[in-house]
Image (cartoon, rainbow, N blue to C red):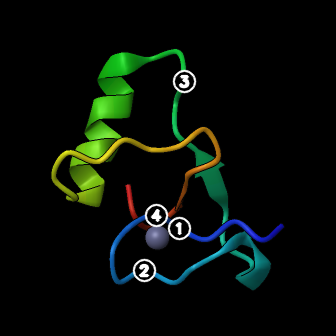
């Protein structure tokens, strides 16, 4: 399954050669930073949500 970036207006995916990584599960502080970077209010990343290297 291709993993597309969770950031709005970002269509990068690891299929396109971007380095997509899942949200930090063990570091709440870093995780919140990522959620901030995504910029969606009241959004919680799913276990499989990823961000590409240019979005965080
Ligand atoms: Zn992205």
How far apart are labels 4 and 2 at the CA level?
Answer: 7 Å
- Residue sitting at 30 percent across and 44 percent down? 35
How far apart are labels 2 and 3 at the CA level?
Answer: 22 Å
Q: x and y percent of residue 37 in the render?
A: 26, 53
The residue that disc 3 covers is: 25
The residue that disc 4 covers is: 6
Q: Which mark is residue 10?
A: 2
Are the residues flagged by discs 2 and 1 in contact, CB closer than 8 Å? yes
The answer to whether residue 15 is left or right of residue 5 is: right
Are the residues flagged by discs 4 and 1 in contact, CB closer than 8 Å? yes
Quarter assignment of residue 20: bottom right
Disc 1 crowd rating (10 Å Cα; few below 14, some 14-19, many 20+) is: many
Between 41 and 27, the one nearer to me in the picture: 41
How far apart are labels 1 and 3 at the CA level?
Answer: 17 Å
Q: Is mark 3 within 8 Å of ligand 1?
A: no
Q: x and y percent of residue 12 in the render?
A: 57, 80
Quarter assignment of residue 3: bottom right
Q: Which mark is residue 5?
A: 1
Q: Is mark 1 within 8 Å of ligand 1?
A: yes
- Residue sitting at 45 percent across and 44 percent down? 45
- Residue sitting at 74 percent across and 78 percent down? 17
How far apart are labels 3 and 4 at the CA level?
Answer: 16 Å
Q: Is mark 2 within 8 Å of ligand 1?
A: yes
Disc 3 crowd rating (10 Å Cα; few below 14, some 14-19, many 20+) is: few
The answer to whether residue 46 is left or right of residue 37 is: right
Are the residues flagged by discs 4 and 2 in contact, CB closer than 8 Å? yes
Query: Which SS class for mark 1?
Result: loop
Query: Which SS class for mark 3?
Result: loop
Residue furthest toward the left?
Answer: 41
């Amino acid at each position: 399954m291709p993993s597309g970036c969770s950031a709005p207006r970002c269509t990068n995916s690891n299929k396109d050669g971007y380095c997509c990584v899942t949200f930090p599960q063990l570091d709440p502080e870093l995780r919140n930073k990522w959620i901030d970077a995504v910029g969606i209010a009241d959004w919680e990343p799913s276990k499989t949500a990823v961000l590409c290297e240019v979005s965080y």
